[in-house]
Amino acid sequence: MTVLDVPAISTVELTSSRASPLLVVGPSLGTSVRELWGEVAALLSGQFYVLGWDLPGHGTNRSVSEHPVSMASIAQGVVAAVDRFLAVNGLAHPLFAYAGDSVGGAVGLHLLLEHRPRISGAILTCTGARIGDTASWRERAHLVAGEGTELLVEGSLQRWFGPGFAQRRPDITDTFTRRLLEVDPTGYAQVCGALAGFDVTDRLAEIDAPVLAIAGDQDLPTPVTLLREIAEGVQDGHLAVLPGVGHLAPVEAPESVAELVIAHLSA
């Protein structure tokens, strides 16, 4: 039997408005939450207290588990990290809203399924109830574990951003390239393993919290069809499609994402 670990998750304060309703945000594979959600968080400051989290071996999280992890165990780690942060800082937020991009969205689906009493509503961007296929994730995990993340840079930039974005914002693509190169290969490979075993397609109908699915119409890894499947599969789902946007909607269209977050959570 494979032993699954609950990974250590690090948290990052993205706004300082601690008296506001809590919004927890999660990253995409190969990114740090501060760069991915920072601009959206700034636009939400004053309306939400935004707390981010980083995947094992990513961003502020230099911890890597000795055992394989699953999407469900990462979700469990996120709840534990949020509770730990709140306790240490004397904060009381028994409920929180959640937003996640790609892997962060997949974790969000497990939060909605297994930690429903804590979640008031969710925004799932550029994700799916299943992402890619098992063989491809296992192959990528094997390559990165052996050779590091450098071999992923070119392909990741092509997958992450819509046409022309890299030319318009080379500063952002340079930052995301550096962060990808800083990712611990073991942590990256473990998250690939979690994606290889991730599929909650048959469980979407169990989700009764309000869910907004945000798609980029230029997103190749998680096209609009996957976000529509989520919106139509949950009990209270809605779909928004952002034109010209690729896989990292919070970076490419922060104003639009922030407006959608406010509208969804206010409703």
Image (cartoon, rainbow, N blue to C red):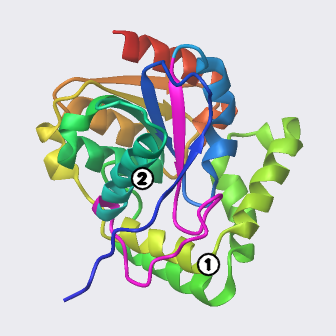
Residue 37, given in percent of the width and then of the height, sits at: 61, 37
Name the kind of residue labelled 2 in the image.
Ala
Q: Is residue 123 visible?
A: no
Residue 225, given in percent of the width and then of the height, sits at: 37, 39
Whether residue 167 sits left or right of residue 143 in the image: it is right
Task: Provide the major secondary structure of the magenta segment.
Answer: loop
The answer to which quarter of the image holds residue 156 is bottom right
* Relative height, residue 160 to residue 241 (above, below): below
* Relative height, residue 194 to residue 148 (above, below): above
* Relative height, residue 108 to residue 139 (above, below): above
Name the element at disc 2.
Answer: helix
Foreground label between 1 and 2: 2
* Sequence-first tag of 1 and 2: 2
Between 85 and 205, which is closer to the camera in this rendering? 85
Between 205 and 23, which is closer to the camera in this rendering? 23
Q: Which mark is residue 68?
A: none
Q: CA distance from mark 1 to mark 2?
A: 22 Å
